[in-house]
Each structure stands twice: as structure tokens, then as C-alpha cells.
Image (tube, rainbow, N blue to C red):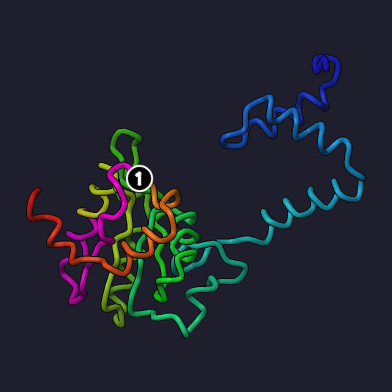
Amino acid sequence: MDLSSSKLMNDAVDAFASLPGIGRKTALRLVLYLLRQEESQVNHFGETLLRLKKDIRFCRQCHHIAEKELCQFCSNYSRDHSVICVVEDIKDVLAIENTHQFRGVYHVLGGRISPMEGIGPSDLHIESLLERVAQGGVQEIILAMSSTMEGDTTNFYLFKKLSGYPIQVTTIARGIGFGDELEYADEMTLGRSILHRIPYEKTLVNK
């Protein structure tokens, strides 16, 4: 199909191709698929995306996705609020929840320290984590960064910032291979890594 004759088609393909992991060929297939659907289905698809952008917010406490001020974890008092699992991204929360091995709450940093990418501590949700700890009631912080150089750097920075508080700082066991992202780890391996977490100090022995 010659897209040069249709600006609307080109614009639609460009919009889909702007999404992560979507090339122009895949974008074209998606656009053609939508064109073959009933108008009501396409309207529903578009309205769902608009509602997503309008109604989804970020939890004021942990920065996970939420529909109210607090997310489903921070507002759930059957969870153990004395244990906070610190992760890089929302996808990591979903990966850990799928293991059914963690009953604490979360804190989403929104990334990891990476000087090469120009990301420093001030670009992440670190101060709000320290505020949660300073309020009291927290007994353990689990550092669940990815096993990368940037993840290790972030872990060490957080450990130093948290060292002045009377809490235990642990990290997930290294069932996750170096360079691996949490979201791609199989559920059994990730679940065991959380259950068999270790004091962060022990990881510093050989550094």
C-alpha cells in the first residue's frame, strides 16, 4: 500500500511507530488491523487510552500507578508496611507480585543512577523514600535493583543514605544473573531471590 497518498495513514503509522519496540512494519499492521474493525471497537480502544491518561496517576507515597491518592499496596493494611521493597520501575513491581512471595509494600525509584545517561540521585524518587523511613515504622528496606553496574551503583548509594537509620537494609539473593533485569527473570528464580535476601553489608566484602 502506498502510504504517500494518505496523510492520515502516515500519521497513524508514525504514532504507533513512536511506541517502544514498535517498528514501522508492525505499526502498519496495527493500523490496518484497526481499519478493519467496527467503528465502535475503535472508539472503545481510543476512549480507553484517553481514560488511561486522564485517570491513572502515581501514588503519592510509593510512586506506583494508582487510581486514587494511594496505590493498591499502600492503601492495603493487610500488607506489611514495615518492609519496603525498592525497585527501579513499575514493571518490577508487577514481576515481584507475580511471584506471590512478598507481602510488604514498594517504593518505585523511577530509574537507576547512570552518569552515562545523565541520571543522578536527584532525578529519582530517593528523597521521598528517606522521608518514609524518617517517619518511623519501617524495619527493613529491600534493595531490588537489576544486576547491572547501574543497579549496583544505585544500591550502594541508597545503602549509604540509609545507614543512619535504625533499620535493616537487605538485597535480593543473586539468583538473578549479572546484567539481568527483574522483569525478565522467571517467577521461581525471582521468588527465591526475594525469600533468601541477604544483608546488604555482606555484598560489600569483596568490593
Q: Residue at x 26, y 60 (%)?
A: 173
Query: Where is residue 134 drawn, in percent x and y?
Result: 28, 75
Query: Please, what is the three-letter code of the amino acid marked with disc 1?
Result: Asp
Magenta span includes 168: yes
In the rendered view, does 204 fall on the left or right side of 67? left
Q: Residue at x 80, y 14 (%)?
A: 4
Quick check: 173 above or below 5? Answer: below
Quick check: 195 above or below 110? Answer: below
On-image quarter of the N terminus: top right
Residue 187: quadrant of the picture: bottom left
Query: Where is residue 47 drawn, in percent x and y?
Result: 79, 53
In the rendered view, does 196 fall on the left or right side of 27? left
Question: What span is in magenta?
Answer: 157-180
Query: As drawn, which residue projects farthest toward the left?
Result: 205
Q: Residue at x 7, y 55 (%)?
A: 205
Mark 1 nearby-residue class (10 Å; few <14, some 14–19, many ≥20): few
Magenta span includes 159: yes
Residue 24: quadrant of the picture: top right
Query: Where is residue 25 drawn, in percent x and y?
Result: 69, 25
Query: Where is residue 198 drawn, in percent x and y?
Result: 21, 66
Question: Number of marks in the image?
Answer: 1
**Viewer-nearest residue: 78 or 58:** 78
Say which element carries label 1.
Answer: loop
Q: Which residue is mark 1?
A: 180
Quick check: 82 above or below 128? Answer: below
In the rendered view, does 179 fall on the left or right side of 14? left
